[in-house]
């Protein structure tokens, strides 16, 4: 896997990233890879926020994975800074290759470099394979999450 590079995403990466976001039963219901406009607008906001780290994993110049790492300073836990991992996706051809582990390990290391004391992530309740994956990497299912669409 020495040919793998994890780097900040560029505008040119957004099409392949959105395709990965849409390439599963949940994503197929909520993503629109045929209209990149909203995604490019969001990307512009992300690159101008130093607390946001949208990265891609590439192999042979092909985007094969992605995640977003957000750094959040806070007051709780004695003023702890935490990170949130979101939007983890692995290209279908790469699933099971260890790439997901490498991406999460990158996020853990980067969180440490950013001074975080805690890393959080959420996973849809239907993604039981993902739950086992995160637990294998040392994450605990310690909270119940809630969301509300606006």
Image (tube, rainbow, N blue to C red):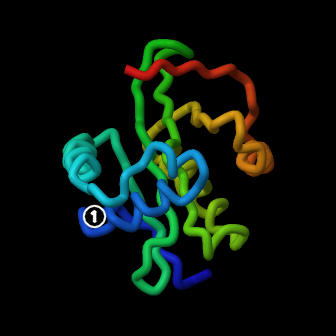
Q: In the rendered view, does 41 fall on the left or right side of 101?
A: left
Q: In the rendered view, does 134 fall on the left or right side of 90?
A: right
- Residue 14 x/y as whole percent: 32, 61
The answer to which image quadrant residue 55 occupies is bottom left
- Residue 45 x/y as whole percent: 22, 42
- Residue 99 x/y as whole percent: 62, 68
Identified at 28% across, 50% down, the residue is: 39
Q: Nearer the viewer, residue 87 or 6?
A: 87
Identified at 43% across, 22% down, the residue is: 149
The answer to which image quadrant residue 71 occupies is top left
- Element at badge 1? loop
Q: Nearer the viewer, residue 67 or 5?
A: 67
Which quadrant does the C terminus fall into? Answer: top left
Identified at 52% across, 44% down, the residue is: 112
- Residue where numbered disc 1 is placed: 10
- Residue 97 x/y as whole percent: 69, 73
Residue 42, placed above or below residue 124: below
Residue 61, placed above or below residue 27: below
Q: In the rendered view, does 90 fall on the left or right side of 39?
A: right
């Amino acid at each position: 896997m020495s040919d793998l590079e994890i780097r900040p995403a560029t505008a040119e990466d957004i099409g392949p990233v959105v395709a990965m976001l849409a390439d599963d039963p949940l994503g197929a219901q909520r993503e629109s890879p045929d209209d990149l406009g909203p995604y490019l607008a969001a990307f512009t906001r992300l690159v101008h926020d130093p607390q946001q780290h949208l990265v891609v994993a590439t192999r042979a110049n092909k985007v094969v994975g992605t995640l977003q790492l957000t750094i959040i300073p806070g007051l709780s836990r004695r003023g702890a800074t935490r990170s949130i991992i979101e939007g983890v996706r692995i290209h279908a051809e790469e699933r099971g290759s260890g790439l997901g582990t490498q991406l999460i390990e990158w996020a853990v290391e980067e969180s440490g470099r950013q001074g975080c004391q805690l890393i959080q992530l959420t996973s849809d309740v239907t993604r039981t394979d993902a739950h086992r994956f995160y637990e294998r990497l040392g994450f605990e299912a310690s909270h119940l999450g809630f969301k509300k669409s606006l």
